[in-house]
Image (cartoon, rainbow, N blue to C red):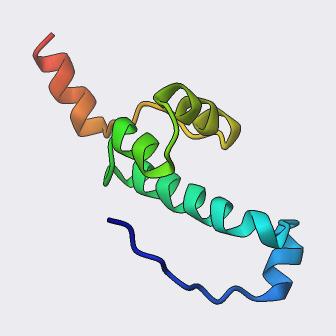
Amino acid sequence: MTRQVTVEFPEEAMKALDVRPERLPQELREAAVLHWFEEGRVSQGQAASLLGVPRGVFFDLLNAHRVSPIQMTTADLDEDFRHA
């Protein structure tokens, strides 16, 4: 099941972001999923699924937006090192 969401977006913002109206829904979707991924709210697989792309394409998207594919906190790293 999917849910359609209507978002009001100022014309000035579209111009400032240099995004075409027909690309806005996809760019908003990508921005939201990348943000959720950075926050640790979704995994790589979940993010790829939400965008309807293979994981490799999601990695390309991460690279294009300069987002690290590894989302670990310093506490996560400390824990990994303790168990290494």
Q: Position of residue 5 (x, y in %)?
A: 49, 80
Farthest residue to the front: give it.
1
Could you say which quadrant of the image residue 46 lies in? top left
| Residue 52 in picture, x, y percent from top left | 49, 45
From this view, report whether residue 68 is shown above or below residue 80.
below
Report whether 9 appears left or right of 68.
right
Quadrant of res 49: top left
Which residue is depicted at the point 76% across and 89% down? Answer: 10
**Image height of 16 relative to 31, above or below:** below
Q: Nearer the viewer, residue 78 or 38?
A: 38
Q: Position of residue 56 (x, y in %)?
A: 53, 25
Q: Is residue 48 left or right of residue 41?
A: right
Q: Residue at x 62, y 66 (%)?
A: 28
Q: Residue furthest top?
A: 84
Q: Position of residue 6 (x, y in %)?
A: 55, 85
Q: Nearer the viewer, residue 76 or 36?
A: 36
In the image, residue 64 above or below residue 26? above
Q: Give the position of the N terminus as an image quadrant.
A: bottom left
> Would you place residue 30 above or below residue 3 in this image?
above
Image quadrant where one finds the C terminus: top left
Q: Residue at x 36, y 36 (%)?
A: 45
